[in-house]
Amino acid sequence: MSRRKRKVETTEVEADLPITPMLDMSFQLLSFFIMTFHPTPTEGQIAMTLPPAEQGGGSSNPDITEEKPKKYVVRVAATENGQIAAMTFREADAPDEGGENLGADLNVYMKKIKSLADAEMKRIAASATKGTKIPPPKLTLELGDKLLQEYVIALFDSGVQAGFTDIAPVPIDKGKR
Amino acid sequence: MSHGSTDKCEPNMTPLLDLVLQLVMFFMISANFVMEQTSVEVRLPEAVSAKALGVADDTIIFLNINAKGQVVLPPVDREGDNDTLDNPAQVEGYMKRRAAAERLKTKKDKPEATLILRIDRGCPFEKSYPIMKACRTAGYSNVQLRAIRYSGQEG
């Protein structure tokens, strides 16, 4: 008995993945993301100190060092439309009225506090070599009621750039603190 | 008689598809999703020295204050139907409730969350200061002011 060997015919089938619809969809997704791409401005923070109640001073942290930090006060009067009208500088222990007039220019304010911060940093560095620790200086901003946040931030910004790490805002009117 | 070949001439789409998918992925990843707590329209001022949030600031509370000095609550933080807190007393009550909830959670005496104030650039100090005071009364001491990070160069 002859057995006829059955030859199985194999036809090669090429798997063809339809790429075109996938590409169409990808283009649609791409165009959607390109059109909705809106880089939002990066936000950041400026640290501030909430002054303790009924005091113009800064931080509530207990002072464990022997030396007390230097405290400076900048009083900023505002115009009716919320801009800076005038700035005066004084040391915290000095009387409220008077002080050094800085005008309404933020650059003058910046130069003044930068020179103070630099001098204080030198003093801190010199005392560190002798083994005594002086805490960083404090800056209190006495702000006029109408002053807009735009200018409040500008004052803080200059303070931080000058080297102050402890900046506290308070109203000029002591009754409101 | 010879017949012309019937070979199909197809452009190779695969590299194009690879490229497009990579672009799609780029745009998907770099898409800025709106943060729930900061979605409120507040025009922030600009500052050069504004720094990004630190790793240590794990619990953060955002407080959005509009130009009128009202605290605008995002949907995620709303209590009932109120979406704004119009006066410092309301803000103080709200912050005290949040502080109590936080103290209950962390079992600590004082709330340790970082409070970030997003104050509109047009808000006068007489409106923003009572809110700062209310936060201080509620027990929050780590308070920061939010600003747009600005390189200092005009384009």
Image (cartoon, coloured by chain):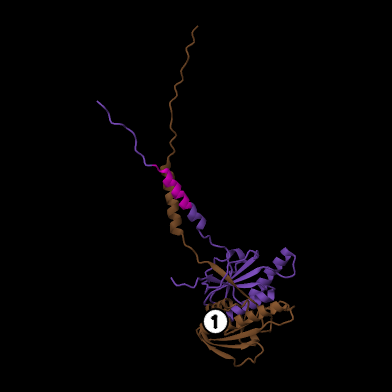
Chain colours: A brown, B purple
- In the image, residue B76 sits, relative to residue A66, either above or below, namely above
Main structural element of the magenta stretch: helix, strand or loop?
A: helix
Comparing B87 with A148, the one in front is A148
Q: Residues within 10 Å of mark 1 (few under 14, many from 20)?
A: some
Whether residue B13 appears in magenta in the rendering, the answer is yes
Q: Kindly give the residue lying farthest to the top in the view shown.
A: A1
Quadrant where the C terminus of chain A is found in the figure: bottom right
Comparing B97 with A60, the one in front is A60
Residue A164 x %, y %: 61, 78
Q: Determine whether, in the image, residue A110 is placed left or right of residue A7.
A: right
Q: Secondary structure at mark 1?
A: helix
Residue A85 x %, y %: 52, 87
Q: Which residue is mark 1?
A: A110
Comparing B140 with A160, the one in front is A160
Q: Which residues are magenta?
A: B12-24
Res A16 visible = yes
Q: Kindly give the residue lying farthest to the left in the view shown.
A: B1
